Each structure stands twice: as C-alpha cells, then as structure tokens.
C-alpha cells in the first residue's frame, strides 16, 4: 500500500464519508410538541436520530459513506478501474445530497410537519455529502483523460 497515491480529493471525500456515516446516528429531527410523531419517536421536545427516522434511506446514506473509503482502498492497492476514479463516488454523493435536502427541507417526515425541525445530524449529513462530492469530483478531474482542443489531431 502506497499512501503517497492518495491526494487531497480522496482525503476530503473520506472525511466527508466519516461525517455522513456518523450523522446517521445523531439527532436529525427535533419534535416540537406532544402531538409530534416521527416513526417511533414521539414529542414533546425530543430528538429523533437518523437511524430511527429514516427507514431505508439510512442504508443508502451508510452505503454512500462507505464509497469514498472503498475508493481510497482501491487507490492504495493500485487496482485499475475502467472508469475515472471518483465518478461513481460523485454519483452516489449526489443521490445522498438529494435525499438529505429533500428530507430536511422539501418534505420532512413525521406529523404535524410544522412541529418537526432539523437537528445537528441533518446539518452534518449535508456537510458530509458536500465534502464527498467535492473530493470525488476533484479526483475524477485529475484522473480523467485530457481532451484536445477542436481542430487538433
């Protein structure tokens, strides 16, 4: 294993993956009053972790958190890939970011929706997803084939 092969992009993505993985077990949603219900969490003034609130999405987020670690392992081992390094990680991070933003801003789970607010876990997941995306795009740009300008053979 050659740790010199890892560049800044992989390190940023791995840190993002660690943040995203940890965020699933932190408080994602705060329940406002005694009528607030989110899966197995009930108010008043309580928090609900991502693990308890998200259902199947929690597994998708954990798989996304593993993607940069797997990419770093592939690079450390020197395995050849048939696609530019970082592209698959970038795609999975975009899916995780979309789900995170949808569940936190567009349509938060639970009812009544006015009594459900996002917690520190949601913000950490958002930061982790952005870091994974930035790191994987950085890596895919470095390992992609260079294109020639028009008219050059």
Image (cartoon, grey):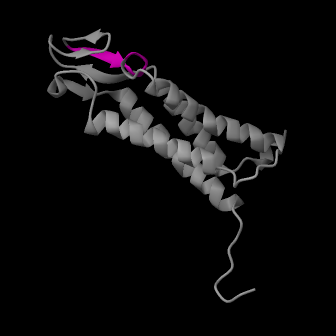
Q: Quadrant of residue 102?
A: top left
Residue 20, relative to residue 39: is it above or below?
A: below
- The residues colored magenta run 45-52
Residue 1, relative to residue 83: is it above or below?
A: above
Q: Is 56 situated left or right of 48 in this image?
A: right
Rendered location of residue 133, percent (x, y): 52, 48
Q: Quadrant of residue 106?
A: top left
Rendered location of residue 103, percent (x, y): 33, 33
Please give the count of numbered marks on the rendered protein.
0
What residue do we see at 67% from left, 89% from top? 151
Rendered location of residue 69, percent (x, y): 66, 35
**Magenta run includes residue 109:** no
Which quadrant is the C terminus positioned in?
bottom right
Which quadrant is the N terminus positioned in?
top right
What residue do we see at 39% from left, 27% from top? 121
Task: Please state which of residues 45 and 68 is positioned toward the viewer in this rendering.
Answer: 68
Task: Please state which of residues 82 and 66 is positioned toward the viewer in this rendering.
Answer: 82
Q: Is 30 situated left or right of 8 in this image?
A: left
Q: Is 96 situated left or right of 85 in this image?
A: left
Residue 71, relative to residue 45: is it above or below?
A: below
Looking at this rendering, what residue extends furthest in the bottom direction?
151
Task: Please state which of residues 119 and 36 is positioned toward the viewer in this rendering.
Answer: 36
What residue do we see at 24% from left, 28% from top? 117
What residue do we see at 47% from left, 42% from top? 95
Rendered location of residue 3, percent (x, y): 79, 42
Q: Quadrant of residue 25?
A: top left
């Amino acid at each position: 294993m050659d740790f010199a092969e890892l560049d800044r992009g992989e390190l940023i993505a791995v840190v993002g993956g660690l943040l995203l993985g940890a965020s699933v077990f932190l408080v994602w949603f705060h329940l406002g009053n005694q009528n607030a219900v989110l899966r197995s969490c009930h108010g008043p003034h309580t928090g609900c972790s991502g693990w308890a609130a998200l259902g199947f999405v929690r597994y998708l987020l954990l798989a996304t958190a593993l993607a940069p670690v797997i990419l770093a392992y592939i690079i450390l081992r020197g395995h050849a890939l048939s696609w530019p390094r970082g592209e698959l990680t970038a795609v999975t991070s975009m899916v995780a970011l979309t789900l995170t933003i949808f569940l936190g801003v567009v349509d938060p789970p639970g009812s009544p929706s006015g009594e459900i607010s996002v917690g520190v876990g949601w913000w950490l997941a958002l930061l982790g997803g952005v870091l994974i995306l930035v790191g994987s795009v950085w890596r895919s740009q470095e390992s992609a084939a260079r294109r020639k300008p028009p008219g050059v053979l």
